[in-house]
Amino acid sequence: MMGFQGTRDTTPSGRPAPRTTGVWLGIGGLIGCLTMASVSGCAAYRFGSASMFRPGIRTIHVPVVRNDTFRHDLGVRLSEALVREIDGRTPYKVSGDPNADSTLACRITNETKRVLTETDSDDPRALEAAVTVRTTWTSRNGEILMQNSLIPSSDVAVVFSQDSRFVPEAGQSVDTATQAAIEELAARIVSQMEMRW
């Protein structure tokens, strides 16, 4: 009996054997707990830029922007800028299908140019071009996805306005300033598509 007890807990040299079974069980249990916690606890979390956007929306329809101004090309230019911004910054895919998950409808309501500074002979030296847009973003079932949370209103559209300064003496034109304003408007509209915290 005595020899049986000694052979089980000793090494060939007669020293007591280290107890490694409990250590391995502890490490295995810890790994199992961490795996279960990461799988079940983090299932609702999303990583990367996709976490900033609505999870139920995958496609977005962007019809040509309606234009109430006399500059007929502004609507097409803003539509192109919006499509570039959505493709480049969001997980959404732009679709030509009106039955997409959501629709981003915009309307240019105003385009102005005003003089900021003049020379001594009353020639314009620095000017400002401004563009104003009304935007609605709705889901397929009619839910409003973009709202102005600062000013409660019954109006479903969000109004964006952007200006851009230009100096004709430096070779800048109203077209370059308007294009800069359009690109900035598109960036601001797409930024508002992010989910609120």
Image (cartoon, rainbow, N blue to C red):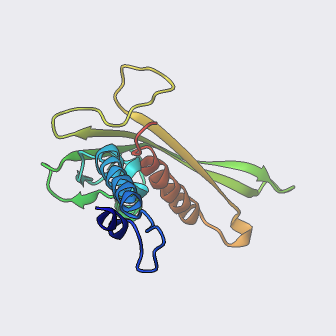
Q: Residue furthest bottom?
A: 13
The residue sitting at 45% across, 75% down in the picture is 14
Nearest the camera: 55 or 178?
Answer: 55
Q: Position of residue 131 (x, y in %)?
A: 51, 47
Q: Position of residue 95 (x, y in %)?
A: 20, 59
In this view, 17 is above or below 69: below
Task: Describe residue 42's horizontal placement relative to residue 173 as left or right.
Answer: left
List x then y, in percent, for residue 50: 37, 54
* Residue 74 appears in the rendering: no
- Give the residue at x 49% y 49%: 188
Q: Is residue 97 above or below residue 11?
A: above
Q: Nearer the viewer, residue 79 or 137?
A: 137
> Which residue appears at 29% of the width and 56% of the height?
92
* Location of residue 149 with respect to 48 vertically, above or below: above
Q: Is residue 69 left or right of residue 39?
A: right
- Residue 169 in view of the camera: yes
Residue at image x 16%, y 50%? 100
Of the 4 image quadrants, the one containing the N terminus is: bottom left
Q: Is residue 114 left or right of residue 35?
A: right
Residue 172 spot, x, y in % from top left: 65, 68
Between 185 and 26, the one lying in front of the other is: 26
Numbered disc total: 0
> Looking at this rendering, what residue extends furthest in the right direction?
120
Q: Quadrant of residue 102?
A: top left
